[in-house]
Image (cartoon, rainbow, N blue to C red):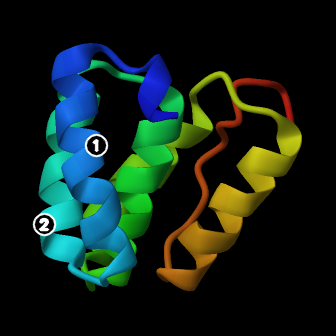
Amino acid sequence: MADSLKPDARTHFVVGYPAFNDKDFKTASVEFGIAYKLDPEVPLLFTWAQSERLGGNCPHALELYQKYLYSDINRDQADYARHWIDACGGVVRGGGGRAWP
């Protein structure tokens, strides 16, 4: 994924990725958030949401998952996001970028 990002965004992604793997979710979330703002690629949005959820910030993760649902994603990706929305105690509000139940 990093190869497809704009150079400025890639710089932040490559800092966030090892932080995520080291369970430093605060750093990962900050870096993924910056990367997404510099280059709003859909996979970054999900990765950012995961780091927020794993860092204990479900309210923000829910916002990001919901935005992800309205992105250009497939049904499996939408179902997976809905799983994590449910895990955070959230309610799915449509989404998936398609007319899926």
> Which residue lies under the disc numbered 1?
13
Residue 24 lies in quadrant: bottom left
Q: Is residue 37 visible?
A: yes
| Residue 55: % across, % down | 26, 81
- 38 shown above or below 31: above
Which image quadrant: the C terminus? top right
For this view, does 12 lie left or right of residue 101?
A: left
| Residue 5: % across, % down | 38, 20
For this view, does 92 lie left or right of residue 101?
A: left
| Residue 49: % across, % down | 39, 58
Residue at image point 28% right, 43% down: 13
Q: Is residue 101 visible?
A: no
Question: Which amino acid lies under the numbered mark 1 shown in the image of this protein?
Answer: Phe
Question: Which amino acid lies under the numbered mark 2 shown in the image of this protein?
Answer: Thr
Residue at image point 59% right, 71% down: 84
- The answer to which of 83 and 93 lies nearer the viewer is 83
Q: Is the residue marked by circle 1 packed among few (<14), some (14-19), or many (20+) residues within 10 Å?
A: many
Total labels drawn: 2
Residue at image point 24% right, 75% down: 25
> Which residue lies under the disc numbered 2?
27
- 40 shown above or below 81: above
For this view, does 95 lie left or right of residue 24?
A: right
Q: Secondary structure at mark 1?
A: helix
Q: CA distance from mark 1 to mark 2?
A: 11 Å
